[in-house]
Amino acid sequence: MGRAHPASLSSSHPSRHRLELYALVLASVLGVLVYILERDPATVYLMPDVIGSLGLWGAASLPFSGQIPEFVHVYICILLTALVLDRTLFIHRSITLAWFLFDFMAEMAQHPEIAASISDRIPRWFSDVPVLQNTQSYLLGSTFDPLDLLFIFLGSIAAYLTLTFSNRLEGPRHV
């Protein structure tokens, strides 16, 4: 029987992803705080009623509060995906590009002309799938903001840099 390569053992060790986990927690806290302090609870999908009853909405006036969730969403999705997939440079680039494109297209779909066109083509069965049932209201009720596209780009770059920095701290990986 052969011995396992040390790199393969260390890649499954829980402390191997410590930086990504800390970054995920911090980004999540930031995102939740923005939603609690800056968004009307009645307009936020999946926000518990108890959060709205706290009366914190509108308590702060954070700069870029409309764009921070765009940054946080793509950042968290990239890091979460990287945690479950192989740790190569190619995978990190692919994950970053895929999530950037997904978030970019979701934001572009909010453009009034694009949203109206897409909305007319949403299949009826979407209403039977909990994750998809609000697609039409998302498209037609959301506001397209070109600044959101910038924050999606910045969140993607930040996530990629976090992964790159983490890999350098934690030791070499095969490319």
Image (tube, grey):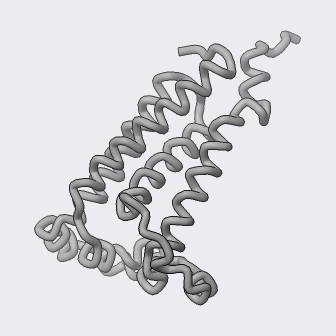
Farthest residue, direction top: 2
61 versus 26 height, above or below: below
Q: Residue at x 61, y 17 (%)?
A: 173
| Quarter of the N terminus within the rendering | top right
Left or right of 137 in this view: 68: right
Relative to the observer, which residue lies in front, 61 or 6? Answer: 61
Q: Kindly indicate the quadrant of the structure image that contains residue 61.
A: bottom left
Relative to the observer, which residue lies in front, 119 or 129? Answer: 119
Relative to the observer, which residue lies in front, 161 or 110? Answer: 161
Left or right of 52 in this view: 14: right
Residue 84: image location, x then y, percent: 62, 40
Q: Residue at x 48, y 71 (%)?
A: 60
Left or right of 121 in this view: 160: right
Residue 42: image location, x then y, percent: 45, 86
Relative to the observer, which residue lies in front, 112 or 23? Answer: 23
Q: Kindly indicate the quadrant of the structure image that contains residue 162.
A: top right
